[in-house]
Image (cartoon, rainbow, N blue to C red):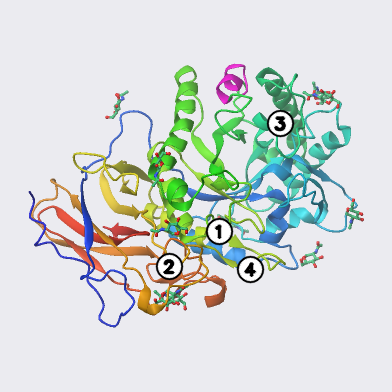
Amino acid sequence: MLPFHHLLLSLLLPRLTTNPINPSSPSHSHHQYPVPRLYTPNTTSPDVLESFTSLSIELSSFPSYAGNLSHPNYFSKTLLTNLAHLSGSPPYIRVGGNTQDYALYSPSLTVALNGTINPARSPDYPTSLTIGPSFFESYLTLGDNIRYTHGLNFGLGGNISHHPQAWISLLETVGLVCDVLTKGNGTKLYMWQYGNEPDLYSTSAQGPVRSREEWDEVRYVRDWRNGTAAIERVVRERCPELGGGRGRYLGPDFGGVGNRLSARKAWEVGLNEGGEIGLFSTHKFISGAATPGVTLQHTLLNHTVTKRSVDAHVVEYDAIRAKDPSVPPLVFGEANSLYNQGRPGLSNTFGAALWGVDFQLYSASVGFKRVHMHQGTNYRYAAWQPVETEIATKGTKAPYYAAVFVAAALGDLVRRSARVLSLSPDGSTAGSEHEAVYGVYTHAGSVLARLVVVNMRGYNTTVSGDGLEPYPPSDVPERPVREYTFQMDWWGDCDRKIAVRRLMANGSDAITGISYDGWTYDWEADEGRPVRLGNVTVGETVEVHGGLVSVKVPDSSAVLLDFEG
Ligand SMILES: *[C@@H]1O[C@H](CO)[C@@H](O)[C@H](O)[C@H]1NC(C)=O
Ligand SMILES: *[C@@H]1O[C@H](CO)[C@@H](O)[C@H](O)[C@H]1NC(C)=O
Ligand SMILES: *[C@@H]1O[C@H](CO)[C@@H](O)[C@H](O)[C@H]1NC(C)=O
Ligand SMILES: *[C@@H]1O[C@H](CO)[C@@H](O)[C@H](O)[C@H]1NC(C)=O
Ligand SMILES: *[C@@H]1O[C@H](CO)[C@@H](O)[C@H](O)[C@H]1NC(C)=O
Ligand SMILES: *[C@@H]1O[C@H](CO)[C@@H](O)[C@H](O)[C@H]1NC(C)=O
Ligand SMILES: *[C@@H]1O[C@H](CO)[C@@H](O)[C@H](O)[C@H]1NC(C)=O
Ligand SMILES: *[C@@H]1O[C@H](CO)[C@@H](O)[C@H](O)[C@H]1NC(C)=O
Ligand SMILES: *[C@@H]1O[C@H](CO)[C@@H](O)[C@H](O)[C@H]1NC(C)=O
Ligand SMILES: *[C@@H]1O[C@H](CO)[C@@H](O)[C@H](O)[C@H]1NC(C)=O
């Protein structure tokens, strides 16, 4: 048995009254994690790419998120800048999603976008839409250092006999994106994406765009190659400075690993025979907004679900890599908690932010190089609502804090890259469903930079766990606190204080009042700029002593031990 009793506990600032880390509250369990000194892999580099925590914005919502040249969306710009300060570079933005496969271009449209919502197909986004010339202004509003992937229409634009106008529109769009993103000082066009979730084209719940009989991997690959060849002809004319199509596409962006088309098979029949795909992109939603049995604790605050769900993509990728060692790096090109835009009371809660931390760090630990969290106006899982609408208030939402925490955990990736190691408790894996623990290493795995604990046991701050009616002050249930000890046999004799930064809210059902290291990024505080709250503990430290360090973590919260700061 190791001597835990002499370990320093969290230091509490005396002015605080609402600190949930009360030393007198019961420590319900104690978890010990051995931490290796080095994380040096034997195969390909597990370092993540810069801007690991990135974004995907629904094409039809992009004008709302970004604004236009006369009305830039400064709120979005501020929230992106916050992440850039933590990561060294702003999130990469992929503009696309289901609506990229419905969008047609009209040079005479006087507004950025004219969409028609058909509630029978989707109540959340238009399933028929036209974009005009001013749509492309949105690429110029969020700052010069953002890199974009533009999602092109393959759904309508890829079957010429079905929709000849969409083919013309596709080629015109390529030229317009060239004009806006590749001129001036350096290109902001990172990649193209031709088609969103083509594995679902013949089965889509929003209406199939291919016939069940004809749509298979061979047909997909033939059409994709034919379409990208045509796109490249436009690129050579309109933005030759891009230097050709090699490595310039995100793909195949399938919606899952068990759908009608298989990415493995598409790869085998020559999807990337020209080397156009620069990142192997796949999409992940943990479950569905309307799927029976989905709850915060059972589905999102459940590491077993996240692990199983992400692992299935690694199995697919590894199978492809076994046959083609040159398959490009793996990313989630679109991901979030619950498909169909999330469920209120789940996807917009602090619990979903904790899920987002676990999901992103776990993905990094199994080889994902970047994760694009999907966004859309009025979407329940959005990191922020960019504009005021009839059904949602403009503001920073809980999932934004997951991006902040993940960015902080990985550190400035421009200065030095990082890799993530998933840590297991000593002895058994019991309890691992309720928490996730990670080590972040820099310098090619030779320096332990940070440790992360995500305690995913639910704790409700409202009577029904729905974020609505707070407990009366006299009746607030006790919030359990768990103690986590890290065992670093290699540490040596020196004692050292380590900075503690917490991702905190009143409970997993909270939808407001979230903070990271005492900072709020809420719209109401200062329009998204960081504001230090006066009611949250900051400046906490823990001490490494004899190679051991312990930290207390209240249920429904996450903590970062920062060896660098
Ligand atoms: C790499 O290391 C892992 C974990 O130690 C091991 O399971 C795997 O077999 C190793 N792979 C190679 C190619 O050595
Ligand atoms: C720019 O955005 C504003 C505010 O949404 C809108 O009123 C204006 O029409 C837009 N301009 C163009 C050229 O689309
Ligand atoms: C938008 O589309 C609708 C339906 O097709 C049409 O009635 C309307 O005139 C269009 N608006 C503009 C500004 O083009
Ligand atoms: C172009 O970009 C480079 C690198 O970001 C910068 O150093 C240079 O000042 C820029 N030039 C202009 C004219 O903006
Ligand atoms: C393409 O469109 C035509 C005309 O609508 C249709 O007959 C054909 O089945 C479509 N092809 C695929 C692969 O769905
Ligand atoms: C391939 O692309 C060309 C244009 O580049 C088009 O005319 C032709 O119909 C396409 N073929 C198929 C099978 O889609
Ligand atoms: C977590 O997920 C696993 C796998 O689906 C399930 O067996 C378990 O019951 C879930 N835990 C909770 C607390 O719902
Ligand atoms: C929180 O509330 C939800 C919804 O009512 C409930 O299912 C869950 O068990 C509660 N969690 C705790 C820890 O009390
Ligand atoms: C969180 O709890 C504190 C103290 O119990 C309370 O003052 C505050 O209003 C709560 N915040 C939210 C968003 O409910
Ligand atoms: C701290 O203050 C913020 C802003 O007023 C509030 O949203 C949050 O709930 C407070 N937190 C606590 C623990 O009192």
Q: What element carries label 4?
A: loop
Badge 4 vs badge 3, beta-carbon distance below 8 Å: no
* Relative height, residue 310 to residue 268 (above, below): below
Residue 229: x percent and y percent?
Answer: 73, 27
| Mark 2 lies on residue | 461
Q: Which residue is drawn at 50% across and 60% down?
A: 349
Q: Residue 383 — which label?
A: 1
Q: Which amino acid does the dot numbered 1 rest on?
A: Ala
The tag earlier along the polypeptide, 1 or 2, is 1
Mark 4: C-beta under 8 Å from nearest atom of ligand 2: no
Q: How far apart are marks 1 and 2 (CA)?
A: 21 Å
Per the rendered image, the range of residues in magenta is 263-271
Pointer 3 residue = 201
Q: Residue at x 35, y 28 (%)?
A: 43
Q: Is mark 1 within 8 Å of ligand 10?
A: no
Percent position (x, y) of residue 546? 9, 54
Mark 3: few/some/many CA within 10 Å (<14, 14-19, 20+)? many
| Dominant secondary structure (helix, strand or loop) of the stretch shown in magenta | helix
